[in-house]
Image (spheres, coloured by chain):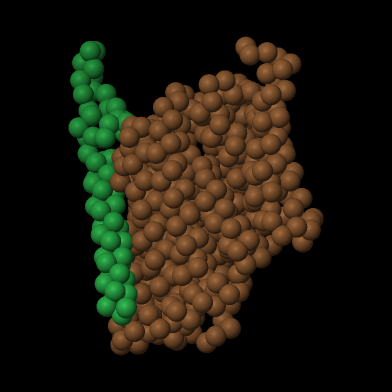
Chain colours: A green, B brown
């Protein structure tokens, strides 16, 4: 009984922590990605001037 | 004291950084649904962070302390609900085009009157849930800063409202993901610390206390009460506005389904940890401690000051992530379902309306927070109203070929009226839980409305 309880608790705690790490890593990726296109999205307009468009957040 | 304040301040700064990086919403579609661009992991984290509020943390630890595994059984009903929604409802909801809220979906399936009714119920429910969250936040923050509870409530309401009103759903989801990461690491760490440091043989203590607590729980709770609790947890939070918004905000229908199924599986593990924490606390915390005080008392007793401050950060994450989701969902429901059906307003006006509604809902919730009895009781009252009022209409509307507006209107009005009557006026009149009575009445009213419609309007 005690061994089963121990295994269950450690397994559950490990699963929770792993899911937290997964979401945390994706969040860091998302936060980094938000900034990058702001610079990359600067493009030439047909009139010759430069226009800076906002990043397209609909892209994954 | 200094360590606690420094940790909480550090947490709020990181939260602000993430909220600022999420950017202010510049269009209503961004504010309401983050332009449907959110990936599975963030929606999953946000969904879990939204439902893991004070009830599913502080409340469940208290229930584990009092009644052992009984509430794990009840929690399984909640997990089943999430998975059922993921498989049967969320993909259908997500597949509707130009749909911002659950009320919007009801409006598309029935008519404008049904949308407005669903919108009013959604806004009211978000206010009720937000009041429960604000009350819990007040309890936690007043301990850190040594300030009166009402000031603590106001401070948390202001902090949450700031990033939710400017960033909309994207800021809400991204800060939720940060908060999810924090509490999913900190809360199991507290359990493992409790089991292996002060108790040394925590597994033996847990196994011993588990039997006694569970037996006491089943002895002190009748089968009718257990049935009522299972029904409340199975149905009470189904598709509440923040969850519906997340189902609608995913990139694809499969991401919508998977996020709910994963969130259901996560809840099983989460409840196991919270209930275990409550059971193991029986070996440390004095018997007779109030159920909402068990977790705080446990950590105060066994942990150094820094550890207690970490718990406060974890609890703040738990509470603020639920509060911001409710504020955003309530504001979007108000704009989309209560204002827009009456007045044609521009995208910019909708955005301003959404922001103003966020502030308004936060203000009402903060004012009502002092009237909340206990966390779980407060949640159960909200469940009792929501499930009968919306579930039959939403679920049947998404599945029936020709849902009838009369059925929707009758069902929602009957559901709210019966739930409120049996919750507040005749709560001792019958033994059957109010949620079941109201749900049966709402379903009956739906069937009546449907057939009256078929008879008098025809099969058109």
Q: Position of residue B80 (x, y in %)?
A: 44, 50
**Horizontal placement of B433 versus A25: left or right?**
right
Quadrant in the picture for the N terminus of chain A: bottom left
The residue at 23%/17% (across/down) is: A45
**Horizontal placement of A30 versus B47: left or right?**
left
The residue at 70%/34% (across/down) is: B445
Question: Which quarter of the picture shows residue B14?
Answer: bottom left
**Horizontal placement of B121 versus B326: left or right?**
right
Q: Residue B315 versus residue B106: which sits nearer the camera?
A: B106
The residue at 56%/31% (across/down) is: B396
Q: Is residue B182 above or below residue A40?
A: below
**Horizontal placement of B296 versus A30: left or right?**
right
**Residue B34 visible at all:** no
Quadrant in the picture for the C terminus of chain A: top left
Q: Position of residue B215 (x, y in %)?
A: 51, 77
Q: Is residue A6 above or below residue B78?
A: below
Q: Position of residue B122 (x, y in %)?
A: 60, 41
């Amino acid at each position: 009984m005690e061994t089963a309880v121990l295994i269950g608790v450690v397994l559950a705690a490990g699963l929770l922590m792993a899911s937290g790490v997964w979401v945390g890593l994706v969040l860091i990726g998302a936060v980094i990605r938000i900034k990058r296109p702001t610079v990359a999205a600067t493009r030439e307009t047909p009139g010759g001037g430069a226009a800076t468009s906002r990043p397209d957040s609909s892209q994954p | 004291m200094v360590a606690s304040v420094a940790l909480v301040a550090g947490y709020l700064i990181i939260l602000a950084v993430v909220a600022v990086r999420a950017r202010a919403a510049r269009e209503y579609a961004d504010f309401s649904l983050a332009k449907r661009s959110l990936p599975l992991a963030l929606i999953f984290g946000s969904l879990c962070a939204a439902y893991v509020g004070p009830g599913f943390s502080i409340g469940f630890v208290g229930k584990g302390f009092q009644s052992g595994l009984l509430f794990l059984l009840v929690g399984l009903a909640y997990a089943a609900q999430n998975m059922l929604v993921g498989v049967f409802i969320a993909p259908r909801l997500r597949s509707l085009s130009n749909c911002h809220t659950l009320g919007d979906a009801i409006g598309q399936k029935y008519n404008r009157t049904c949308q407005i009714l669903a919108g009013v119920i959604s806004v009211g429910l978000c206010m009720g849930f937000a009041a429960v969250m604000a009350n819990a936040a007040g309890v936690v923050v007043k301990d850190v800063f040594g300030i009166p509870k009402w000031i603590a409530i106001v401070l948390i309401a202001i902090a949450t409202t700031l990033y939710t009103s400017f960033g909309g759903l994207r800021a809400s989801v991204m800060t939720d993901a940060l908060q999810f990461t924090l509490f999913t690491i900190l809360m199991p760490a507290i359990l493992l610390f409790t089991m292996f440091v002060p108790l040394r043989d925590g597994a033996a203590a847990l196994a011993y206390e588990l039997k006694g607590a569970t037996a006491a729980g089943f002895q002190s709770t009748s089968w009718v009460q257990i049935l009522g609790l299972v029904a409340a947890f199975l149905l009470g939070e189904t598709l509440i506005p923040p969850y519906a918004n997340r189902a609608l905000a995913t990139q694809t229908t499969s991401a919508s389904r998977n996020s709910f199924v994963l969130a259901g599986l996560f809840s099983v593990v989460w409840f196991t940890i919270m209930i275990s924490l409550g059971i193991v606390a029986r070996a440390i915390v004095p018997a007779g401690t109030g159920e909402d005080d068990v977790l705080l008392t446990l950590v105060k007793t066994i942990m150094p000051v820094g550890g207690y401050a970490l718990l406060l950060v974890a609890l703040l994450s738990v509470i603020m992530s639920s509060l911001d989701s409710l504020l955003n969902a309530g504001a979007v429901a108000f704009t989309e379902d209560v204002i827009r059906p009456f007045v044609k307003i521009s995208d910019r006006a909708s955005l301003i309306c959404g922001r103003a509604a966020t502030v308004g809902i936060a203000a009402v919730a903060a004012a009502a927070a002092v009237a909340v009895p206990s966390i779980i009781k407060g949640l159960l009252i909200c469940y009792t109203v929501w499930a009968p009022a919306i579930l039959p209409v939403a679920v049947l509307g998404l599945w029936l070929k020709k849902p009838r507006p009369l059925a929707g209107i009758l069902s929602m009005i009957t559901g709210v009226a019966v739930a409120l009557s049996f919750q507040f006026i005749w709560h001792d009149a019958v033994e059957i839980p109010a949620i079941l009575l109201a749900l049966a009445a709402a379903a009956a009213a739906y069937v009546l409305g449907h057939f009256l419609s078929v008879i008098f309007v025809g099969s058109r």
